[in-house]
Amino acid sequence: MIPVCSGCDQACFLVHDMHRQRVREAPLLIYRIELEVPVRRLRCPICGPTRERIDWLPGRPGVTDTLHQWVERLVDLLPIRHVADLVGLHWHTVKTIDKQRLQRTLPVPDATRLRRLMMDEFALHKGHRYATVIACADTQQVVWVGEGRSRESIRPFFEWLGAARKQIEAVAMDMNSAFDLEVKAQSPNAAVVYDRFHVVAKYGREVVDRVRVNQANQLRDDKVARKVIKGSRWLLLRNADNLKPEQAVKLEELLAANASLSTAYLLKDQLKMLWFADDEAAARGAWQEWAGMARSSGIDALVHFARKLEPYLEGIVSSARHRLNTSVLEGMNNRIKVIKRMAYGYRDTAYFFLKIRAAFPAKCDEPFFISQ
C-alpha cells in the first residue's frame, strides 16, 4: 500500500524507518486501552519530511476518533480539568479538542439580519483588563466578543459587519463615550440608547451618596443621628418596591427628617420616569422639568450631575422610540463570570470568547446564522 502524506494527502516516497506512536482509546468499562501504532516516515515533495496519514487517527493528538468524540461530548457537561482526569488525558489535549470543536461547529451570525444591538463590558482579568460583548437584542445571541473597551477595540466588529452596519437601527449601552462615538461614526443610522440602570446607578453614586455623606458630616455632634444617616445607604439606593415593611417605615422617617436627602431621593425616582415617556417630545418635556428642579434644588452634587447628564440627553430620549436596555446583557455577564469561575480563569482569550458565544446561541424559531 502506497503511504499518503498526513499534510497534503499526496502519495510520497517511503523513508526506511518508522516509529511507534502510543494511541489512547476510549475506556471500555473498567479497562483502559492503549495502542502502539507503527507510523512510517515519508519524504514529501510538498511538505518535506513528514509522517503517513492514518485515517482513524485524527490529526496529531494521540487519541482515536472514538475518544476524540467522547471528549467533545464530555466538555459540554464538565470543566476541562474534570474531563482530563476522567479520560486520563493532559489538560491541554482536552482543551485543544474542545477549541477545535467550537471552531468547527460554532455558527457564524448572519450580519444582514442584525437590527438592534446591546453592548456592554465585563472584567476579563484582574488589573482593570476588560472585554466587550455585543449581542442581538431581538434573539439574545452573542454575535461578537473582543478584548478591550475602547473605540479601537470594538472597531473590528463593525469591520465584520461590513455593509450591514448601515441597517443597524439602535444600540443599547451604558454611558461609555468610546462606544457612543464609534457607533455614531460606523453606523450613522443607529440611535444610541443609554441604559436606565447604569444612569440611575451613577446618580446613586454621585448624588445620593454624596448628599448622604455631607448630611452625616454636618451631624458630628449628634452621634445617634449621624449613625442613622451613615447606615441608610441601601435604604436610599434600593427600589422602594423591594423594601420590607419595616424598612419602608425607616426610609419614610429618614426622608421626613432630612430635606436634602428627601429631595435627592425623590428626584431619583423622577429621573427613572424619563425612560417611560410615550414619545420623544414627552421625554424632552420631562427632562426640562427634571433639570429645572435639579438646578433649583441648591444641592451642589445634584446641580453638577444635571449639568454632566445634559450632553447625553439624546441617548436618553431615544429610549422613547427604541425600548431597549442592557438588562439581558447584564444577566449574560453574570453567566460569563460563572463560566470563567468554573474554569478557574482562561489564559487563552480566543478560547474563552468561543465558550461565551457557544453559551448564548440565538433564541428564535428560524436559524439566525449561516454555516461556516
Image: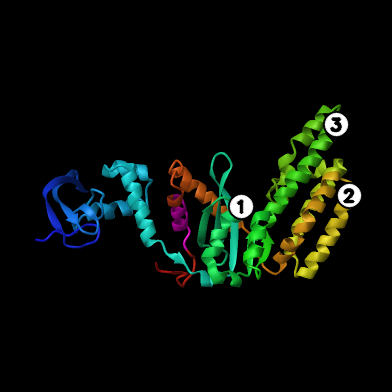
* First along the sequence among labels 1 and 2: 1
Question: For mark 1, what is the residue?
Answer: 150
C-alpha separation, residue under disc 3 versus residue under disc 2: 21 Å
Q: Quadrant of the C terminus?
A: bottom left
Q: Label 1, secondary structure: give it.
A: loop
Stretch in magenta? 352-361
The image quarter in which residue 45 lies? bottom left
Q: Label 2, secondary structure: give it.
A: loop
Magenta highlight on residue 246: no
Q: Nearer the viewer, mark 3 or mark 2?
A: 2
Structural crowding at the residue carrying mark 3, measured as other residues with C-alpha within 10 Å and reported as few (<14), some (14–19) or many (≥20):
some
Task: Residue at 63% x, 70% y: name it.
Answer: 169
Q: Do the residues bearing badges 3 and 2 touch, measured as CB atoms within 8 Å?
A: no
Question: For mark 3, what is the residue?
Answer: 219
Report the amino acid beneath label 1.
Ser
The image quarter in which residue 53 lies? bottom left
C-alpha separation, residue under disc 1 versus residue under disc 2: 36 Å
User: Which is nearer the eye, 23 or 20?
Assistant: 20
Report the amino acid beneath label 2.
Ser
Report the amino acid beneath label 3.
Leu
In this rendering, the answer to whether 82 lies above or below 165 is above
User: Which is nearer the eye, 248 or 296?
Assistant: 296
Question: For mark 2, what is the residue?
Answer: 297
* First along the sequence among labels 1 and 3: 1
Structural crowding at the residue carrying mark 2, measured as other residues with C-alpha within 10 Å and reported as few (<14), some (14–19) or many (≥20):
some
Task: Residue at 87% x, 54% y: name it.
Answer: 293
Q: Position of residue 143 (x, y in %)?
A: 51, 62
Q: Label 3, secondary structure: give it.
A: loop
